[in-house]
Image: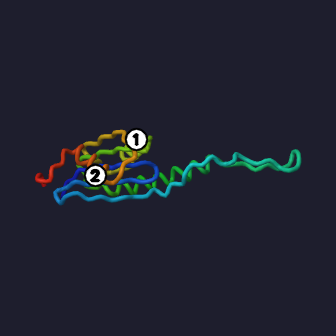
Amino acid sequence: MAHSKVGIWLDHREAALVEISDKGISTRFIQSGVEEHINEKRGSRSKTPYGPQGVFAEDKVDRRNQNQLNQYYSEVASGINNADSLYIFGPAEAKQEFAKYLEQNQAKKPTKVEVATADRMTETEIIEAVKKHFHYKQELF
């Protein structure tokens, strides 16, 4: 079984997986499909006084959003099955949410997991950040 080191840059919209193994470097991008959380109207008033009013079910939207995130995290987690070391980085809280998801849901966990904050990056910048983190040198593999 080939062992690898995987770097994942992710936010709530997309993830970039960079795998370093004895076969070289491979990248994979996953789109989340999570709907953007918009500030929806919180109900509506009737045109007649004391008439029926519309109600906004915010908990239903939150549940749907969480289900979409869980599917997204599941798909990202499927890309790290044989990873020995995992480097998760990105903006906001998605990286912590994903690390927590792995802890709770992944049967085979990487031996070493590191989480760091990073801004939005291009594909090249993501690959270089992962190479730098794992001290990758071409001649090692």
Mark 2 is on which residue type? Ile
Q: Residues within 10 Å of mark 1 (few under 14, many from 20)?
A: some
Label 1 close to label 2 by CB (< 8 Å): no
64 displayed left or right of 74: right
Tell me residue 29's x, y (percent): 36, 58
Q: Secondary structure at mark 2?
A: helix
Tell me residue 107's x, y (percent): 32, 51
Colour scheme in use: rainbow
Extreme residue in the left direction = 139
Tell me residue 82's x, y (percent): 25, 55
Instruction: Tell me, yes or no, if residue 3 can be seen here.
Output: yes
Residue located 30% across and 53% down the image: 124
- Which callout, 1 or 2, points to the residue nearer the camera? 2
Residue located 54% across and 54% down the image: 35
Disc 1 designates what residue? 96
Q: Quadrant of the C terminus?
A: bottom left
Q: Nearer the viewer, residue 41 or 127?
A: 127
Q: Secondary structure at mark 1?
A: helix
Q: Earlier in the sequence, mark 1 or mark 2?
A: 1
Instruction: Tell me, yes or no, if residue 100 can be seen here.
Output: no
Extreme residue in the right direction = 49
Tell me how far mark 1 sits from mark 2, CA to CA: 20 Å
95 displayed left or right of 130: right
9 displayed left or right of 136: right
Q: Residues within 10 Å of mark 2 (few under 14, many from 20)?
A: many
Mark 1 is on which residue type? Gln
80 displayed left or right of 55: left
Above-or-below relation of 9 to 115: below
Disc 2 designates what residue? 127
Tell me residue 123's x, y (percent): 33, 54
